[in-house]
Amino acid sequence: METYEEERIAALDGRRRDEANGGPDRPSLEERFGPESFGCHEAMHVTQLVVDLSQLVQHSAVLLNPVWHRR
């Protein structure tokens, strides 16, 4: 069974192969998604949205409404 780190490395290798087709003038993954980049900020923003949604399903108003709580 693969560890999370092995899965991450395999996914990153695949992403780097895909990115190689973008041409030599394309900024690297590190430039576009590394710390302090817009891409990194975007990932943190989406993470916060997911956390907020998981907390929302535990809110009393949502628990009281079966339609809202349906997944």
Image (cartoon, rainbow, N blue to C red):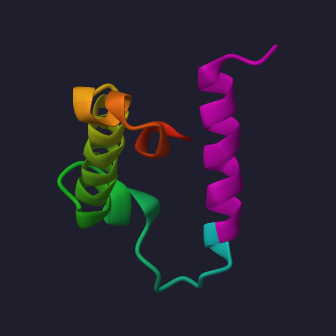
Task: Residue at 64%, 71% (x, y): give it.
Answer: 20
The answer to whether residue 42 is above or below residue 27 is: above
Residue 37 is drawn in which quadrant? bottom left
Above or below residue 31? Residue 6 is above
Q: Nearer the viewer, residue 60 or 44?
A: 60
The magenta span reads 1-18
Q: Is residue 57 visible?
A: no
Q: Residue at x 70, y 62 (%)?
A: 17
Side of 19 relative to 57 (left or right): right
Residue 4 visible? yes
Q: Which residue is most to the left?
A: 36
At x 68%, y 78%, the residue is 21
- The x and y percentages for residue 8 are 60, 34
In the displayed orientation, state which residue is furthest to the right: 1
Numbered circles on residues, count: 0
Q: Residue at x 62, y 59 (%)?
A: 16
In the rendered structure, the answer to whether residue 30 lies left or right of residue 24 reads left
Indicate yes or no whether the magenta region holds residue 61.
Answer: no
Quarter holding the N terminus is: top right
Side (left or right) of 65 relative to 4: left
Image quarter hosting the C terminus = top right
* 24 sits left or right of 65 in the view: right
Name the magenta segment's main secondary structure.
helix
Q: Position of residue 66 (x, y in %)?
A: 47, 37
Quarter occupied by residue 6: top right
- Whole-percent x, y for residue 7 in the image: 68, 31
43 in relation to 8, above or below: below
Return the residue nearer the eye: 3 or 67. Answer: 67
- 6 is within the stretch colored magenta: yes
